[in-house]
Image: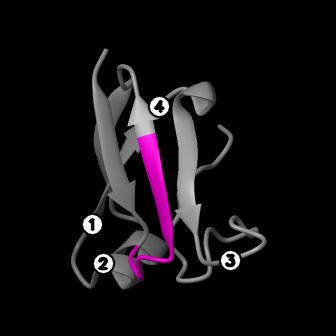
Amino acid sequence: MKSHEARCACGGVQYKFTGEHYTVYACHCTTCQQRTGSAFGLSMLVPATSIEITESDFDDVVTKDGVHCSTVLAAKV
């Protein structure tokens, strides 16, 4: 089974994704444009059960808008 490790933009939260993703897409909304400084942001849809937080500098990892640096790690759709 495939495994990928990544981190948020500031490096304060590290996570691991195991398994297959549903899809990868480019979002052109204003929030993604501001977050990336470009015309779009890339996102990947994965099953919620396949993500594991492996390291965090924060007690409350995920806030309403993402992690503390505004990186969106998870959202329910």
Q: Which mark is residue 36?
A: 2
Mark 4 touches mark 2? (CB < 8 Å):
no
* Residue for point 53% across, 52% down: 54
| Spatial separation of the CA atoms under disc 3 and disc 4 | 23 Å
Q: Which mark is residue 54?
A: none
Residue for badge 4: 46
Which quarter of the image is occupied by the C terminus?
top right
| Spatial separation of the CA atoms under disc 1 and disc 3 | 28 Å
* Residue for point 67% across, 71% down: 65
Residue for badge 1: 40
Range drawn in magenta: 9-16
Tag 1: amino acid: Phe
**Marks 3 and 2, the one that precedes in the sequence:** 2
Crowding around mark 1 (Cα neighbors within 10 Å: few <14, some 14 to 19, many 20+) is: some
21 over 57 or under it: above or below: above
| Spatial separation of the CA atoms under disc 1 and disc 4 | 19 Å
Tag 4: amino acid: Val
Mark 3 touches mark 4? (CB < 8 Å):
no
The local secondary structure at tag 4 comes to loop
| Spatial separation of the CA atoms under disc 3 and disc 2 | 23 Å
* Residue for point 75% across, 68% down: 64
**Closer to the observer: label 1 or label 3?**
3
Residue 8 percent coordinates (x, y):
43, 69
Residue 44 percent coordinates (x, y):
37, 41
Rendering quarter of residue 67: bottom right
Mark 2 touches mark 1? (CB < 8 Å):
yes
Residue for badge 3: 58
The local secondary structure at tag 1 comes to loop
Residue 57 percent coordinates (x, y):
60, 77
**Marks 4 and 2, the one that precedes in the sequence:** 2
